[in-house]
Amino acid sequence: NPFISHLNNLLLHGIVVVLVFFFFRNLGLSIAEAFLGALIFAIHPSKVEPVAWVSERKELLYTVFYMASLLSYQKSRFLSSLFFTFLSLLANPMAVSLPLVMLLIDWFRGQGWGLKAVINKWPYFLLFAVVIAGARLVLFGHPPIQILQTPLIWIWSLVFYIQKFFIPVVFEPLYTLPQPVGLFSSAYVVSLVFLAGLLTMMGFFRK
């Protein structure tokens, strides 16, 4: 009977939505704006999708700790932020993006993206280095990804998630990378062009 597992997913999703609301409030948004942002997060198909799948509990669990880490960081509670980061990583290595989001929070607060801001996050990077090393050991024996392919995979993944946010259709239990991974594949060329155009637009309209 999958009822308990589905209920567990639903409760975890509810906790995440509440944390997202307070995250927006800490960024300075009004109650109405924070509520709207949390509502979009709550009902967006890409976020509802893992709630419906029992097997995706790991994503909900890591997101609870992920948002708790960001909320702690916003309140300058670095030890609790680091602790929640560790728990998020244990649930899902996808939490490696946390320092990047923290840098965005610094930028939003007007603190800049200087070298000092990056150095201050060394405990997070140390945690991630350990997790990445562990993940490589677990995946030992699988065909390794070449170093030159990694940036292309990152860019394709970023564009993929942007597309799923604005056009939330055709969801699948397992997404596979377009093959072959390289500039001879149209999927990676299109992703590169799209990202270059997006960054150019952001620079042009940065004010």
Image (cartoon, helix red, strand yellow):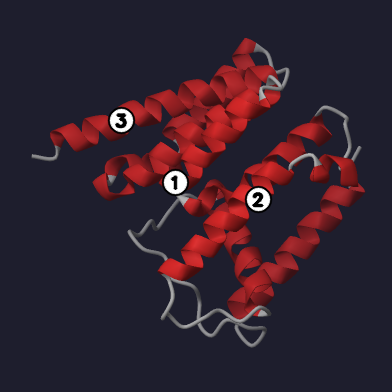
Look at the numbered discs 3 and 2 and tell me whether their residues touch, using CB distance below 8 Å. Answer: no
Amino acid at circle 2: Leu
Any mark on residue 90, and which? Answer: 1
From the image, tell me which residue sits under label 2. 126
Near mark 2 (Cα within 10 A), the count class, few <14, some 14-19 or many ≥20, is: few
Amino acid at circle 3: Leu
Look at the numbered discs 3 and 1 and tell me whether their residues touch, using CB distance below 8 Å. Answer: no
Quadrant position of residue 28: top right
Give the residue drawn at x 32%, y 26%: 11
From the image, tell me which residue sits under label 3. 10
Give the residue drawn at x 79%, y 61%: 197
Q: Nearer the viewer, residue 166 or 151?
A: 151
Looking at the image, is 22 positioned above or below residue 116? above
Question: Can residue 98 be seen here?
Answer: yes
Looking at the image, is 143 positioned above or below residue 65? below
The N terminus: image quadrant = top left
